[in-house]
Image (tube, rainbow, N blue to C red):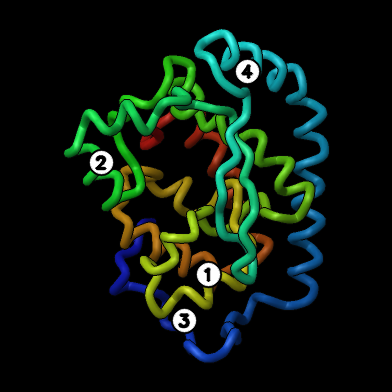
Amino acid sequence: MILQTNQLPENVNVELNTTKITNGGATRYNHVAKLVLDYAVTLPSLLLLAPLFILLAVLVKLDSPGPIFHRRRVLGQNGRVFNAFKFRTMYVNGDEILARYPKLRQELNKNYKLKCDPRVTRVGKLLRKFSLDELPQLLNVLTRDMSMIGPRIIAPNEISKYGPYAPMLMRVMPGLTGLWQVSGRSNTTYDERVALDMQYITKWSVWLDIKILLWTIPVVLKGDGAY
């Protein structure tokens, strides 16, 4: 399922000076269906998962000092910056901890991910393994900052990694899950993540969203590629 960046779908059509995207599936019907799917999944999930939210909040608070939630500044549709909510998985003095490991700092700057991150708390490791730390992003879906399914959320300084495909990425909402989530997650290279985002955008349909949503469940339960 993973694509290399030199294997992008043939119908990718990015023009640097325009916001036009060639995507045969992006009809008005599909956009409405995507909106309905987002709310049909998000609203029941928030109600059913409320007890789990409370339990995880207590565990985060008891495990280490600091706030329960972490607000990550990320890029949304049309380049708008917003706060993506997560359960806090790191110690509050994470920068001080990482400063002791120069090689890990270099790896983080390159891949924006660390497989063995000394900043992550004990509870944080569990939350990350099963993507439980991302559950608060259901609130971001509810407020239309995110969609249930879409490209990865990225920090503002990551947009340069997308090169000529950046305008295409900025035309859609990031997702709580997506092709990257079901195609190896953090075990993929950054180029592969870019390729997967482009594949999703150019091939998008509501049926693809439903497939990814169903694929996400076993992937999350296995916990592979998450750290």
Residue position for label 4: 56
Query: Going 51% across and 24% down the picture, which residue do you hit?
Result: 127
Residue 220, image x, y percentages: 50, 33
Q: Nearer the viewer, residue 213 or 114?
A: 114
The image shows a total of numbered marks equal to 4
The reply to whether discs 3 and 2 touch (Cβ–Cβ < 8 Å) is no
Real-space Cα separation, disc 4 to disc 3, in angstroms: 41 Å
- Whichever of callouts 4 and 3 sits on the residue coming sooner in the sequence is 3
Element class at badge 2: helix
Q: Could you tell me the amino acid type at mark 3? A: Val
Q: Could you tell me the amino acid type at mark 4? A: Leu
Residue position for label 1: 169
Real-space Cα separation, disc 1 to disc 3, in angstroms: 12 Å
Q: Could you tell me the amino acid type at mark 2? A: Arg
Residue position for label 3: 12
Quick check: 223 left or right of 151?
Answer: left
- Whichever of callouts 4 and 1 sits on the residue coming sooner in the sequence is 4
Q: Could you tell me the amino acid type at mark 1? A: Leu
Taking the image as drawn, is residue 3 in sight? Answer: yes
Query: Going 28% across and 74% down the picture, which residue do you hit?
Result: 6
Tell me, for residue 105, which label it has, or none: 2
- How busy is the neighbourhood of tag 1: few (under 14 within 10 Å), some, or many (20 plus)? many
